[in-house]
Image: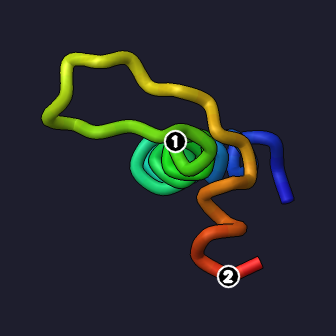
Amino acid sequence: MSVKTMLLGLLLVIPNLILLLVFTYRPLIDNIRLSFYNWNIASTRPATFVGLDNYLVTTWW
């Protein structure tokens, strides 16, 4: 495989990886982060950190 072919492959793959990162992994990480907070979108109060309490309530522990 020549260097020119490898560079062309990278040029075609990198934009797709950036889109995957922006539209898949970033929202996933943001949702995991938000799951540790008690936050109401309609309220003006700031979000309060509750840790694992959101998970403990949903699993009845």
Residue 45, placed above or below residue 57: above
> Furthest-bottom residue in view?
60
Element type where label 2 sits in the image? loop
Give the percent coordinates (x, y) of residue 3. Answer: 81, 41
| Amino acid on which the number 1 mark rests in the picture | Leu
Residue at 61% from the left image edge and 69% from the top image edge: 57
Give the percent coordinates (x, y) of residue 55. Answer: 66, 65
Residue 60, placed above or below residue 19: below
Callout 2: few (<14), some (14-19), or many (20+) C-alpha neighbours within 10 Å? Answer: few
**In terms of depth relative to the viewer, which is nearer, 9 or 25?**
25
Q: Earlier in the sequence, mark 2 or mark 1?
A: 1
Residue 54, placed above or below residue 7: below
Q: In this rendering, would 12 be left or right of 39?
A: right
Which image quadrant is residue 46 in? top left
Element type where label 1 sits in the image? helix
Give the percent coordinates (x, y) of residue 59. Answer: 67, 82
Q: In this rendering, does residue 21 appear at all? A: no
Q: Quadrant of the N terminus?
A: bottom right
Measure the alpha-carbon separation of dots 2 and 1. Answer: 18 Å
Badge number at residue 59: 2
**In terms of depth relative to the viewer, which is nearer, 60 or 15?**
60
Residue at 55% from the left image edge and 50% from the top image edge: 35
Which image quadrant is residue 33 in? top right
Give the percent coordinates (x, y) of residue 15. Answer: 47, 42
Of badges 2 and 1, nearer the viewer stands: 2
Q: In this rendering, would 50 be left or right of 45?
A: right
- Residue ID for mark 1: 34
